[in-house]
Amino acid sequence: MARVFNFSAGPSVLPLSVLQKAAGELIEYGSAGMSVMEMSHRSKEYMTIITQAEALLRELMQVPDNYKVLFQQGGATLQFATIPMNLLTTFNRNADYIHTGIWSKKAIAECNRQGHARIAASSEAENFTRIPRQDELDLDPAAAYVHMTTNNTIFGTEFPYIPDVGDVPLVADMSSNIMSREMDVSKFGLIYAGAQKNLGPAGVTLVIIREDLLGRHAGLPLMLDYKVQAEKESMLNTPPTYGIYMLGLVLQWIKENGGIASIEKKNIHKAAKLYQAIDNNDFYCCPTEVESRSRMNVPFTLKNPDLDATFLAEAEQQGLMNLKGHRLSGGMRASIYNAMSEEGIDALIAFMEDFANRNG
Ligand SMILES: Cc1ncc(COP(=O)(O)O)c(C=O)c1O
């Protein structure tokens, strides 16, 4: 078997032991005589799978009791619309958005279809190379909520702090750094994340919502109403059963690896190594402000962009895949989520040094 080092931004690398466990259980789960994929979502076996996944998630993230955990569909993109639908009220159609990249731009556009997204801060003028500081946030105390993107997958920036937004509910798109670092859930009104980076395969969207935010708006389509989804325990219709099972396996892997605190330490170490290799070599350049750098997505450029295609081709020959930067930011991007091993980082650094020596 020749597994490559997969630096894809998402869907992304999963822990090998998780894939192996899933492979071992693919055709028959336990003594059920069938695959998880073939089970009724209301069967006893499946109810145990989903209940355990939620319990483990609550344990690892220390989710307080007054929050609901929902497994939804439609990706983070559907949440861009579902959030204003649920959290804007008849009398308050205004929300604050901290604008830090393409994903916040999409979230803002969806909010503007339903109400008014006010920009509380933006780093667009600096090409999203940094995160606005707390003292730059111009917050409206009457906003229905404040929206942030904790990690900007495309531009490689990450909030080094949780904004203080007073009594206004803080809503966070954590798609690309969920469970990569400790986060105090009680500081947020709502957290959401597509699973396909740190939690499992695409198809499941995690929503964690404080109970007092349920039912702010009546008459929504049932599938898009958090209150209904919470009452039905994510079983209003058939949930993405296999994705939730895989998410449960990834959570077990996080637990076996010492929980989020331990994973965070490893992430700090892995990211520091890679940034250092970039900063110490003038063949490479990282465009982001040091304090705002993401531990999950590391963008960098080559001194001579004419060499980009050669760099990517040679990297692929060495099993270092998906390093091409997003089309909007150009250059390279190494996505180094929880499941990227230090061995993968070391292999990338060794290749980068060798490439620079031969082409510098
Ligand atoms: C931060 C962030 N938000 C939202 C999305 C969109 O997610 P989805 O494709 O699950 O709708 C992505 C996808 O990469 C992302 O990185």
Image: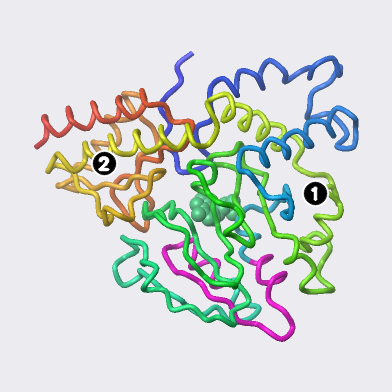
Name the foreground residue: 113 vs 295: 295
What residue range appears in magenta?
81-109
Mark 2: is the Cβ under 8 angstroms from ligand 1?
no
Label 2 belongs to which residue?
A: 275
Label 1 belongs to which residue?
A: 234
> Toward which corner of the image does residue 125 lie, by quadrant?
bottom left
Residue shown at 53% from the left, 27% from the top? 258
Instruction: Count neighbours of disc 1 (C-alpha within 10 A) and say few if under 14, some if 14 to 19, many if 20 or more.
Output: many
Describe residue 230's horizontal placement relative to residue 73 as left or right: right
Residue shown at 63% from the left, 28% from the top? 252
Q: Is residue 203 above or below residue 173?
A: above
Residue shown at 66% from the left, 38% from the top? 59
Q: Is residue 58 magenta?
A: no
Describe residue 97's horizontal placement relative to residue 199 as left or right: left
Q: What residue type is labelled 2?
A: Tyr
> Toward which corner of the image does residue 327 lie, by quadrant?
bottom left
> Toward which corner of the image does residue 49 lie, by quadrant?
top right
Q: Find the residue positioned furthest to the right.
A: 43
